Amino acid sequence: MDHEERTRKREARQVHKSSQYTQKLHGLKAKLHHAKRHSEKVQMKKTLKAHDERNVKQKDEGAVPEGALPTYLLDREGQKDAKSLSSAVKERRKDKAAKYSVPLPKVRGIAEDEMFKVLKSGKSKTKQWKRMVSKATFVGEGFTRKPVKMERFVRPMALRYKKANVTHPDLKATFQLAILGVKKNPQSPMYTQLGVMTKGTIIEVNVSELGLVTTGGKVVWGKYAQITNNPENDGCINSILLV
Amino acid sequence: MATRVPPPKRVKLSGPNVPKPAPPPTQAPSVVVQFRSSVDGSALGPAINLPADTARDGMEMLVNKLKGGEDDDPTPFAFSLLIPNPDPNAQSTDPIKIPVPNSLQSDVLAPTPASLALLKTSIGLGNDFALPTFTSEDIFTVLCEPQAVWRVRPVSRCSSTLTGHSSPILSGAISPSGNLAVTGAGDATARIWDLTTELPKCTLVGHRGWVLCVAWDPLERFIATGGHDGLVRIWDVKTGKPVGDAMSGHSKWIMSLAWEPSHLASTTAPRLASSSKDGTVRVWSLATRRTQYTLGGHTACVNVVRWGGDGLLYTASSDRSVRVWNSADGKLVRILSDHAHWVTTMALSSDHILRTGPYGHEGKRPKDDEEAKAVALSRYQAHVATMPETIITGSDDHTLFLWPAQHASAAAATPKKPLARLTGHQKPVSHVAFSPDGRFIASAGLDNSVKVWDGKTGRFAASLRGHVGAVYRLAWSSDSRMIISASKDTTLKIWDLKTHKIKIDLPGHTDEVYFVDWVADKVISGGRDKSVKIWKH
């Protein structure tokens, strides 16, 4: 074995030897040795960190951000030009498929036994053709129940709502507006007819107090909103206005 | 059963409130008039038989038709009657010119004694002068003097494209006198350009964020710039050096700047108002370079601030309200809250007069600051006499509101109730501007149209269609005959108010145009393609 080989092996063994020495030390010698070793370690850590930072690219603090916009375009969702063509194509495809963009495009499917509760009727309570709706409903102003003997769907008064909390998406302000009607319930057209309001239902609300005006100068008094909560759990109807 | 008409009401036959029958109208005599041009005395058409009570407007229209009308504006005329001197002892035998401001009937044939006395003193005749009696066969010789009518030549060519900015150009303004222009860009610098030589003058470096708004002092001594970093900086125009350090105080970016009008500001310590996204407006005094007072109260971003000529500050904000403040101490005067969405743009009817200050269209330059202040005051008072200062606000709810005059001296019965709601835009309104004479309002919307409305009543006048992208900004020519609009579709278009059609189309920019300004006969525009274009005739 030659000189280089021997020095290399000795240096490799130094690591183990110094570790053994450090662990076996005790008393004042140990304290002094540990203090020296600690300061060495700190220096070593600093050098390693500096090496790491050399490879990482940092954001320049003095640079101004890209995408300058004038004051009247700030805080508006602008569209980058590269995407405009693809989004135009997508818009056209959506129009053909008659899909309209709403805030909640998909809602959870609700089974019929969750929606209705079976009401037993008859002399010995064996007939089971009556159902009671267990979700929030809207019945109109002049609603009168059908004759009780022939009423198949019971809508309890406690679950009937007249007002909804409607949030304007841009203004971020919420108003309590009267419901004019249920436009579409995504679960089934039968629920739309009954006036059942679940999450995702499109309702029409009276917006005359917002002061919106059409291009012809006429006051807008009805707009659609989509329900965003589960009214049967919360006791109130929260919705977002579809502008 | 068919409804029957109610029986006629019984009419009073006597008593104090009985309506008297109207007196039969007196027929004015017909006279024969020969119009002559005052320049060379030549006859303008044949002698015409006219009723003597033809008003001055009627005679003006007639003379314009006789001259062989062009399609342009009719020239206004001043009329005066020539009669031979009846005084036999007069030195000269020149005919006397009697001015006819209203009509021949009221000024010559049957003048009131007061107007006759006035006439005698103005011409310098003796007390015993009497107008000769006119017969129906006399030919009246009426001299027509055309009044001066000034026009602005439309710009038609891009005279130069100036590069230098390394980021989209966000804002710009031409100086009140029309010689210099400053532009602010997203590279945190503003540059001053000389418009007569079309060369850059100096670069104003100092901001740490995009330069969002620039404003010229009405006396052209300073430029104020507001940045995305929330700082307001003042620069000296002649040297391009900053006047002191940046004025800080706002916590978010500056949305707009407004200088105090030159006829109100003191010449040594003018004031500046800045509005910011943090919902406050600060009024800075240039003497101390500190905030004099802060206008709090808005709960959202204050989009526009304007300093009116009567000592009122107007602010429009994204909390759907417009507030009017007293500029002396910063007290709130009124809140106007009729809009249904963010109020993003606002204009005053006296905008043009306040902005140009002492620099009128005659081209006279005031000698010093005091004279400039006096000239600006006289110009402002002449303008406000015809039309009190009203505001128009445009909003994201696609409508504009025209509000009555807010100043105490205008004393509108219900200053909080808007005069009119201007509907018709199909997308948010991006910019609104009054014409310099206050007769029209132009509004630009994101629905590719520019709409023109009547300035006094808010009635819709015309819709100018032609752009294929959202219209971002517009500017009026100083004679109120043309509008120039800058749009997202990279073109500028000049519209003629008479025909409501495109007069001149100015393509040339390669990307969206973010601002345009028109002073005298020069137009400057800049946008996302980082170049400033100057357009001339």
Image: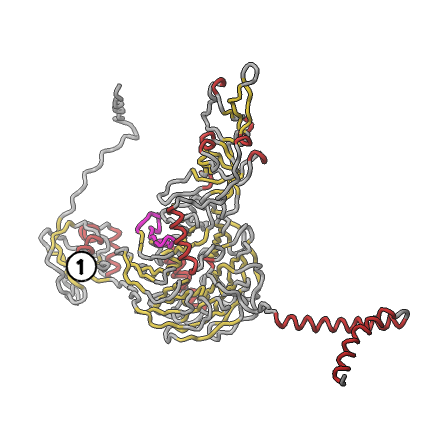
Quarter of the image that includes the C terminus of chain B: bottom left
Instruction: Say if A82 sits above or below B236 in the image.
Output: above
B533, above or below B330, in the image: below
**Label 1 Cα neighbours within 10 Å, binned few <14 / some 14-19 / many ≥20:** some
Q: Chain of mark 1?
A: B
Q: Which residue in the protein does label 1 denote?
A: B69
The span shown in magenta is B441-462
Where residue B160 appears, as percent x and y from the top left, is: 35, 72
Question: Where is residue B31 shown, x and y percent of the image?
Answer: 13, 52
Please state which of residues A241 and A192 is positioned toward the viewer in this rendering. Answer: A192
Q: Residue at x 46, y 21 (%)?
A: A146
Q: How is the image coloured?
A: secondary structure
A151 w.r.t. B478: above or below: above
Q: Considering depth in this image, is B367 or B420 the residue closer to the camera?
A: B420
Quarter of the image holding residue B62? bottom left
Give the residue type at disc 1: Gly
Give coordinates of residue A84: x percent, y percent.
41, 57
How many marks the image carries: the answer is: 1
Left or right, residue B512 beside residue B501: right
User: Which residue lies most toward the front here?
Assistant: A1
